[in-house]
Amino acid sequence: MGSTQPNKSPRGGAGGAHGFRAALCLAAAFGAVLLACASGAAVAQVETHVPAPVAGAKSVTIERITVHSPAIEGNLEGESPDRPVIVVLPPSYAKQPRRRYPVVYALHGYSIGAEQWIKEIRVPQTVEGAFAKGAQEMIVVLPDSKTIHNGSMYSSSATTGDFESFVARDLVHYIDGHYRTIPARASRGLVGHSMGGYGAARIGMKHADVFGALYIMSPCCLSPRDPAQLKPEDVATLEAAKSLDETTRLGFGQRAMLASAAAWSPNPKKPPLYLDLPMEDGKVRAEVAAKWAANAPLAFVDQYIADLKRYRAIAMDVGDQDGLRFDARKLHETLDAYGVDNGFEIYPGTHTSDVAFRFQDHVLPFFSRHLEFSAKR
């Protein structure tokens, strides 16, 4: 089983993540962070330490495409089924037209989209750096799953659309059909950070037939939460919202609550938001709270042990100053208890301070070691 000891890197520090974690204090959707909140203003773009450019690194090619997702069509919230996607092609892609490549799908966190995600993980520099430092070349795909409430939770909902199937089915099908991939589960990796870490855990458990290796970074939302922790004034504000446009002017935590409700407790009979909140008139709604709990990976992981054992490799990491480390450790320990081989590391840092370093020096090398790079015919 993987080590739980922090690495020896001197990097860490608060960066811009203090404000990020503080904003999450209001959001019941974001798991253990509720228990590790501090005051402070929310920031959309957080700071992360930037690796130094690697000498001699060859340039990758960035393509910005749009992928139509039938799984998102017809959602009640009006989310577009035509999703922006960033595709990173390795240096040799154009020069070796017969060569096929594994694909890593990388999921962004809450409140950002794919464009902001590549800034946080410093793509293309970190991808080029990983290859220059010895990682085998692969295609990296970064889909945009931001919604009107700032995040899809990578879940399946009549209100937001089925973003789970968008990633696991529609996106994979498109990429395999338009790029020189190795179209096999053993050659597909899935990684995500924060809400994307939740997405990687959720989708990874449910779609082991699609992906062959799994990396979960600082995952949010792993544990069922007690709705009684919600602030009544926030719930009252959300209950009073009369339009989707009005919700875009609400606070970070309030919008995160709406994102969770839209994903986990949709209600097609309740316009204009088409969702149920886990509290109403100051009282917990047990039936809605149960729906939220049913979407917590620590609540449903036991149902997917056989699927998780199919993975060639599973890894998870989280900063030692990140409130999400407690639930991340619980997931690691659960997998250990069932004999699911997995790596787990707590490293010096906050929720976001070292995400670019981790992507370059840990995530891509992990997939380089564990994906299948030979196209079998």
Image (cartoon, rainbow, N blue to C red):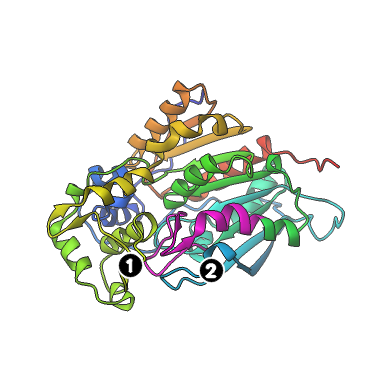
Q: Is residue 214 visible?
A: yes
Q: Residue at x 24, y 54 (%)?
A: 278
Circle 2 or circle 1, nearest the eye = 1
Residue at (45, 54) in percent of width and height:
155
For this orientation, the residue located farthest to the front is 269
Q: Position of residue 228 (x, y in %)?
A: 17, 48
Please name the residue shown 18% across and 48% down the image.
229
- Residue 68 image label: none
Range drawn in magenta: 144-172
Give percent across and percent down for residue 32. 30, 42
Q: Secondary structure at mark 1?
A: loop
The correct choice, above or below, for 257 with respect to 75 in the image is: above
Q: Which residue is mark 2?
A: 73
Q: Circle 1 is placed at which residue position?
A: 269
> Between 367 and 360, which is closer to the camera in this rendering?
367
Q: Quadrant of the C terminus?
A: top right
Q: Secondary structure at mark 2?
A: loop
Q: Position of residue 350 (x, y in %)?
A: 36, 45
* Residue 349 in picture, x, y percent from top left: 39, 42
Q: Is residue 321 left or right of residue 97?
A: left
Q: Is residue 226 left or right of residue 107?
A: left
Q: Is residue 221 magenta?
A: no
Q: Amino acid at mark 2?
A: Glu
334 is higher (above) or lower (below) than 41: above
Identity, as a three-letter code, of the amino acid under mark 1: Lys
Task: Tell me the crowding category of disc 1: few under 14, some 14 to 19, or many 20 or more residues within 10 angstroms, Cα based.
Answer: few
Q: CA distance from mark 2 to mark 1?
A: 18 Å
Residue at 61 percent of width and 63 percent of height: 86
